[in-house]
Image: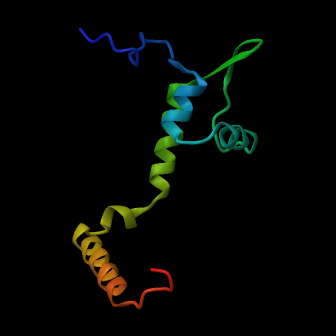
Amino acid sequence: MNTSHTDSPPGTARLLRIREVLQLCGLSRATLYREIKLHTFPAPVKLSARSVGWLQEDVAQWLAARIAQRGPAYDAAPRSNLRAAKEAAVTADRGRAPHEGE
């Protein structure tokens, strides 16, 4: 039996509090509220006079849309080219004259 707190009963929605949303999205609190104001992030659900929560599904959809925005270039980039680029950068740094004080 799975008793994970992320499972919710059928017909109900899981609400995330601000700490969970910030951790999932990697945004600062100020950026999160700025994105909400610009209507680029889902608005919270008012729970009481001083408390709000975000629907987990809304946040998941926002994250999926952000991931999709990176485009096919990320998926198609061969890993071997990344290693070659790093090695070329290291070699170029070795051939560069040191700055004063180094």
54 with respect to 71 (left or right) = right
- Residue at 54% in and 41% down: 62
Q: Quadrant of the N terminus?
A: top left
7 with respect to 49 (left or right) = left
101 with respect to 31 (left or right) = left
- Closer to the camera in the image, 99 or 40: 99
Up/down of 31 relative to 59, above or below:
below
* Residue 54 position within the rendered picture, expressed as x and y whole percent measured from the top left: 60, 25
Which colour style is shown?
A: rainbow
Q: Residue furthest front?
A: 101
- Residue at 34% in and 86% down: 92
17 with respect to 84 (left or right) = right
For the image, the number of numbered tags is 0
Up/down of 7 relative to 28, above or below:
above
* Residue 98 position within the rendered picture, expressed as x and y whole percent measured from the top left: 43, 86
- Residue at 64% in and 40% down: 41
* Residue 43 position within the rendered picture, expressed as x and y whole percent measured from the top left: 68, 31
- Residue at 31% in and 66% down: 76
- Closer to the camera in the image, 12 or 30: 30
* Residue 30 position within the rendered picture, expressed as x and y whole percent measured from the top left: 70, 40
Where is residue 29, by image quadrant? Answer: top right
Q: Quadrant of the C terminus?
A: bottom left
Up/down of 83 relative to 58, above or below:
below
